[in-house]
Amino acid sequence: MKFTKQAIALAVLSASSFAASAATVDVYGKANLTLQSSDEGDGSFTEIKSNASRIGLKGTHDLGNGLSVVYKAEFQVDMDGDSDDNIDDRNQYVGLKGNFGEVLIGKNDTVLKQSQGKVDQFNDLNGDIKNLWKGENRMSDSLTYKSPKFSGFQLGLTYIAEDSVDAEDGISAAVFYGDPGLKKSKLFASVAVDSEVKGYDTMRATVSGKVAGFTLGAIVHNQEPVDGGAETDGFLVSAKYGLTKELSLKGQLQTADTDGGDDKSGFTLGADYKLAKSTKLFAFYTTFDMDSGADEDYAAVGIEYKF
């Protein structure tokens, strides 16, 4: 861990020297912390929580003839100080980009995870879709290919090496249409499948768009354990509406219904208030209704700063 911290510090301090070469280097990060009341079935308690706060380096190096190296080294930072191991690795890869598309090797989000776009309005918070569904995987030993865009369509494929004698290689595949941020297109849609990824086969279809000032999204999801366990179906709908340039309201409903009657659902309401392009204050309330487990409730206020 000491070596990891030293490596991060050295990389950040050296960024300016890299920028002087043919490579571009961006130092970026996000601090997201909440003060919240949490009830996970045994009574409520208060906590200060770091929500996937991070720091990283990313950039490109032009090799000429339309070919570039692309890279990223991103680390999650536990800013609430609850853990001795407060630095963990996130997406970390190197690859090539050109007329053929992009190939990345290392640790990366699968294309199925990427296929959600921006539909999850409470990503990295308690209402994150990963709390009810499988498929939100960031995989080591992976190779990801994305094709060039053709009339707005793009193909994506993640191959996960087995890394063990008894394991099976995993495959994640997706077709994307449009821009996930809805800045370059009015519609985003995707269809994705996982095979043998973290013990599950998963299918997911996603769509989002803007209508009458609302940003709307929906996901249909299916997951099944590779070992033949019960199948789970679910759906998600989300909405965001800007009351003013600074203030936005948002909500999200998610279900997960498993064969045999183990049904779960989550509902979240929230608000964001922009202080600047880099900084926002926010609040949310999340509640989970669990058939076979304890119900959960979370109410929080927080701040997010990006650089």
Image (cartoon, rainbow, N blue to C red):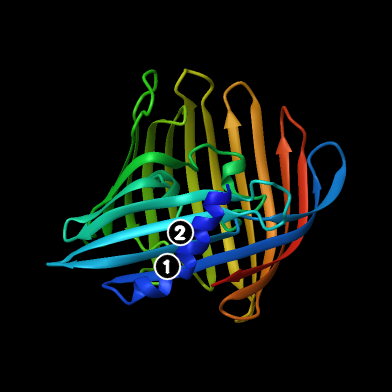
Please indicate whether residue 229 sits to the left or right of residue 268 in the image: left
Q: Residue at x 42, y 40 (%)?
A: 140
- Nearest the viewer among 288 and 103 is 103
* Cα–Cα gap, marks 2 and 1: 8 Å
Q: Residue at x 48, y 69 (%)?
A: 13
Estimate the x, y position of residue 235 in percent, counting from the top left.
54, 43
- Nearest the viewer among 142 and 84 is 84
Please indicate whether residue 68 sits to the left or right of residue 283 in the image: left
Q: What is the number of the mark on residue 208?
A: 2
Q: What is the number of the mark on residue 182?
A: 1
Asked if one can make out residue 123 in the rendered structure from this viewpoint, the answer is no
Is the residue 191 above or below the residue 307 in the image?
above
Q: Nearer the viewer, mark 2 or mark 1?
A: 1
Question: Image quadrant for the C terminus?
Answer: bottom right
What's under tag 2, amino acid-wise?
Ser
Estimate the x, y position of residue 104 in percent, counting from the top left.
30, 50
What's under tag 1, amino acid-wise?
Leu
Query: Mark 2 vs mark 1: which is more N-terminal?
Result: 1
Residues at marks 2 and 1 touching, judged by CB atoms closer than 8 Å: yes
Of helix, strand and loop, which one carries label 1? Answer: loop
Estimate the x, y position of residue 199 in percent, counting from the top left.
47, 27
Please indicate whether residue 119 sits to the left or right of residue 26 in the image: right
Q: Residue at x 41, y 61 (%)?
A: 180
Estimate the x, y position of residue 268 in percent, counting from the top left.
68, 54
